[in-house]
Image (spheres, rainbow, N blue to C red):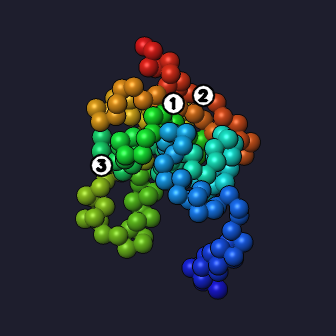
Amino acid sequence: MKLLDEILAANVQFRQNLPKDYSDEDVKKSKLPNRHLAIITCMDTRLVEFLEPALGIRRGEAKIIKTAGNGVTGMFDGTIRSLLVCIFELGVREVMVIGHQECGMAHASSKELMDNMRKRGISGDAIRMIQPELEKWVDDFHHPVQNIEDTVWQIRMNPLIPQNIPVHGLLFHPRTGEVNTIVDGYEELDK
């Protein structure tokens, strides 16, 4: 069976046994995050169905923005654009940047990534178009804590993000569920 077929079959099973808390009323409410929270986190598969419960966050309570290494690569990159929609359209009043220990991005290199692109048939011209950005993004990430601090700072300094939005930085452990505060956004607002 192909992966798509497996996914579609699982969907049929899911719909036939829809949990009670997925009622029509719940679905209508879930568009706006009722805790007014946006979370920027990594796309690591170990966080799926683990990060939110570890934080006491349920369906409909927060907007979750996932990206490789939970980072921001520019003043108007996809993460920032998503945050702008969260803040100005969906009522988000607080942001959490949540990195995690054992992040694969800490061991990635732009050279290896570009070599793998070439092996898969991506042209050298196409790779050269993105090489400077790729090198900065991939090669600058070596320490999850530093990445959290840098991402919080980039969001805090972005002129498109209101200055009264607390931006917190947290470090999550993908095996134990432990969370540690790296940057307290409330303290930053008080400065």
The residue lying furthest to the bottom in this view is: 1
Residue at (70% x, 36% y) in the render? 178
The answer to whether marks 3 and 1 mark residues whose Cβ atoms lie closer than 8 Å is no
Does residue 23 sit above or below 173 in this rendering? Answer: below
Contact between marks 1 and 2 (CB within 8 A): the answer is yes
Q: Which residue is label 1 attached to?
A: 168
Q: Residue furthest right?
A: 176
**Secondary structure state at the residue bearing disc 3:** helix
Q: Residues within 10 Å of mark 1 (few under 14, many from 20)?
A: many
User: Residue at left 72%, top 72%?
Assistant: 17
Front disc: 3 or 2: 2
Dot 3: within a 10 Å radius of its alpha carbon, few (fewer than 14), some, or many (20 or more) residues?
few
Identify residue for label 3.
132
Q: Which residue is mark 2?
A: 181
Q: Amino acid at mark 1?
A: His
Q: Amino acid at mark 2?
A: Thr
